[in-house]
Image: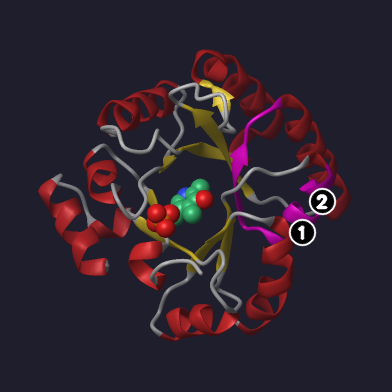
Amino acid sequence: MRARIAAAAAAAGRRAEDVTLVAVSKMHPEAAIRAALAAGQKHFGENRMQEAMEKFPDLKAGHPDLRLHLIGTLQTNKARQAVRLADVIESLDRPRLAEAIARAIDEEGRTPALLVEVNVAEEPQKSGVARSAADAFIEACRQRFAEALRGLMCIPPAGRDPAPHFAWLAACAARHGLPALSMGMSADFEAAIAHGATHVRVGTAIFGPRG
Ligand SMILES: *Cc1c(COP(=O)(O)O)cnc(C)c1O
């Protein structure tokens, strides 16, 4: 995986160090995560708060440099748990969640990095702020969270060419002066790196199929 990331970065004239591999460990047991940690992997992604709460408090206690990314839809009533446990919340996508996260940051005295998730193809079943509403929402989050707002995340439609969506997200981040771009999964991370991804979220290609 690291060799493929390095090759994709080199092909794009980028440095491999500028692409962070987030190993998506959802539905995989703690043992698989421990094996990845032993191999030097530091960033992990989970999409459900409940599962993250079951697996990660112990892992983080034993590995202070582990970084947990929450990449799934976050319910407002889980915002406080998320702020307590996550190092990066990649799924900030609506004003009520922004309010809940802001309140949790005050209460917990801890500030994870935040990414705004954009529904780049405006698919009705997907979370993320609609692409047409993204600029206004990003600006509001910038006002509220300042430097904690680090960048953007997207999950393009399956089975179609993701490149135009990656390009759109990169341009949107540049327009807002945001440094982080989380895009690309097992099937398309190389294309995402070509379009400037700083974080790729890879599950299946690392851990194998999910049970
Ligand atoms: C599951 C998941 C991934 C990883 O997908 P793979 O195809 O297994 O690499 C990436 N991002 C999000 C948001 C996910 O839910």
Query: In the rendered image, which residue does mark 1 sit on?
Result: 84
Q: Mark 1 near mark 2, Cβ–Cβ under 8 Å?
A: yes
Going by the numbered disc 1, the residue's amino acid type is Arg
Q: In the image, residue 19 lies at what x, y percent?
A: 33, 54
Tell me if 35 is positioned left or right of 14 in this view. Answer: right
Cα–Cα span, label 1 and label 2? 6 Å
Going by the numbered disc 2, the residue's amino acid type is Arg
Examine the structure image and report whether residue 181 is included in the region drawn in magenta: no
Residue beneath the point at 73% across and 67% down: 53
Residue segment shown in magenta: 77-94
Residue 80 has which mark? Answer: 2
* Few, some or many residues within 10 Å of mark 1 (<14, 14–19, 20+): some
Residue beneath the point at 49% across and 19% down: 131
Examine the structure image and report whether residue 82 is included in the region drawn in magenta: yes
Q: In which quarter of the image is residue 38?
A: bottom left
Tell me if 77 is positioned left or right of 87 in this view. Answer: right
Say above or below: 30 vs 192.
Answer: below
